């Protein structure tokens, strides 16, 4: 027991800065009683605590040591902070409550708009020229019916009748045709146009104004993953458009995951898998099962892997097949259960060759799902490119992409001016 106290006493003595001297013989006395040793040890601790408050002395007994406890000053309750406690509340929010998880990690003061990634236009002049050439070639059958009217033509009633016939044949629809012709008549009178080339330029300007509301960029980075649900009738090219769109998004450094939600068509899963291998992206698929379950698993996989964009393929169906349309609504509800603010984009793929039937599809799917955008395919080789004007007039759902060929680069963002130039070129 003596050696125990001796081991603690010596360091305490060495830490003292007080001038008092202690006889070394006192530490070597073996006849001292235990009570005396304890008293000496406690006495040695007291100056050590006064001199070096940051050192914690050894506790020799289970009784409370006489070291003073930190006193809490009697400060009145702090007044309510002048700034709102929004930052603390924001840190506890989940990703679906206004911002993405990455945005909250950057701080609640981050502006959501700064997190959005707008795909820039294609800046490569050679690629731009090639795309415009393919677009004009694809719409050549439609434009030939329109541009031939203005060759050495007089501005009279016959010109307007020919224009009306050409617009209706291009499936612009009665509403859009009447709107364009009435606006053209007013512009010819107001600007006193006397040449056919001037009327053609005026028609192009009116067409651009009509189509411009459909021109909208696909906003990326709003959520992780950005869940896109792709729908459409049979044979419009949904699966092919998904593969092309995946390649397009990869150009903007977006990681992509595909969900094979078309469990009805025999080759749909294999076709999407081929596109996944071609683009080097993951495909979530099952040989059989419920489409909603497959897409639900894909959303979870995309969240776990922190994928940027998840695109879900769905089985083709006609708007008149009410039980299949209800199943599509179920898929949307299941996606919302997997990620409460999803799907962020609901795209409808339409075939330009179907003409006015495409407009009926847009209305039916929009009423059932709430469409956020369109992908118009097979504009090449069709004389019915004016369907986009009918959509702009009667159900202006944004057209994100248009396709004028089978190649991957043939699917490009929609531009009102480029489309009008190709249509009236």
Image: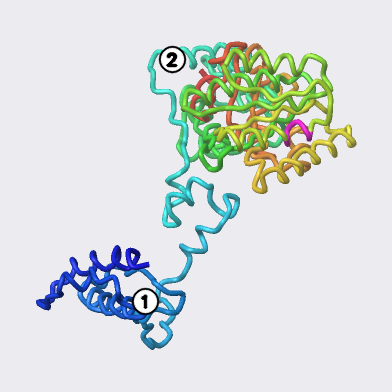
Question: Badges 1 and 2: C-beta atoms under 8 Å apart?
Answer: no
Viewer-closest of 119 and 169? 119
What residue did someone put label 1 on?
34
- The picture places residue 173, in percent across and down from the top left corner, at 71, 31
- Cα gap from disc 1 to disc 2, whole angstroms: 96 Å
Q: Residues within 10 Å of mark 1 (few under 14, many from 20)?
A: few
Viewer-closest of 118 and 143? 118
Sequence-first tag of 1 and 2 = 1
Residue range (magenta): 292-296
Q: Give residue 17's mark.
A: none
Q: Quadrant of the N terminus?
A: bottom left
Of discs 1 and 2, which sits in the foreground? 1
Q: Residues within 10 Å of mark 2 (few under 14, many from 20)?
A: few
What residue did someone put label 2 on?
127
Is residue 62 visible in the rendered structure shown here? yes
The residue lying at 45 percent from left, 79 percent from top is: 63
Q: Quadrant of residue 351?
A: top right
Q: Quadrant of residue 23?
A: bottom left
359 displayed left or right of 37: right
Residue 295, magenta (yes or no): yes
């Amino acid at each position: 027991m003596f050696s125990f106290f001796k081991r603690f006493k010596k360091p305490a003595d060495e830490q003292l800065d007080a001038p008092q001297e202690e006889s070394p013989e006192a530490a070597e006395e073996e006849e001292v009683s235990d009570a005396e040793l304890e008293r000496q040890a406690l006495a040695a601790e007291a100056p050590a605590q006064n001199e070096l408050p940051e050192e914690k002395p050894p506790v020799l007994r289970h009784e409370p040591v006489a070291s003073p406890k930190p006193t809490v000053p009697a400060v009145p309750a702090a007044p309510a902070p002048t700034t709102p406690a929004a930052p603390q509340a924001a840190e506890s929010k989940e990703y679906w409550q206004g911002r993405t998880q990455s945005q909250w990690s950057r701080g609640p003061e981050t502006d959501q708009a700064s997190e959005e990634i707008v795909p820039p236009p294609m800046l490569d002049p050679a690629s731009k020229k090639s795309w415009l050439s393919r677009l004009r070639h694809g719409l050549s059958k439609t434009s030939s019916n329109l541009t031939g009217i203005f060759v050495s033509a007089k501005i009279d009633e016959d010109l307007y009748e020919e224009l009306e016939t050409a617009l209706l044949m291009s499936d612009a629809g009665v509403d859009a045709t009447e709107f364009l012709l009435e606006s053209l008549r007013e512009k010819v009178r107001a600007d006193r146009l006397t040449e056919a080339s001037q009327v053609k330029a005026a028609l192009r300007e009116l067409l651009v104004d009509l189509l411009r509301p459909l021109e909208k960029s696909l906003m990326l980075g709003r959520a992780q993953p950005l869940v896109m649900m792709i729908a459409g009738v049979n044979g419009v090219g949904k699966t092919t458009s998904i593969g092309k769109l995946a390649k397009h998004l990869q150009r903007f450094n977006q990681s992509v995951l595909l969900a094979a939600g078309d469990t009805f068509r025999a080759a749909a899963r294999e076709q999407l898998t081929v596109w996944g291998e071609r683009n080097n992206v993951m495909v979530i698929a099952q040989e059989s099962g419920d489409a909603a379950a497959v897409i639900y698993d894909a959303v979870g996989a995309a969240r776990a892997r922190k994928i940027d964009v998840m695109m879900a393929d769905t089985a083709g169906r006609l708007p008149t097949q009410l039980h299949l349309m209800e199943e599509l609504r179920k898929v949307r509800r299941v996606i919302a259960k997997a990620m409460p603010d999803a799907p962020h984009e609901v795209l409808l793929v339409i075939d330009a060759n179907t003409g006015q039937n495409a407009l009926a599809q847009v209305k039916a799917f929009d009423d059932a799902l709430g469409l956020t955008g369109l992908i118009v395919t097979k504009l090449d080789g069709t004389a019915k490119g004016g369907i986009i004007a009918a959509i702009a007039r009667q159900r202006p759902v944004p057209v994100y992409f248009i396709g004028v060929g089978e190649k991957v680069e043939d699917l490009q963002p929609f531009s009102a001016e480029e489309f009008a130039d190709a249509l009236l070129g």
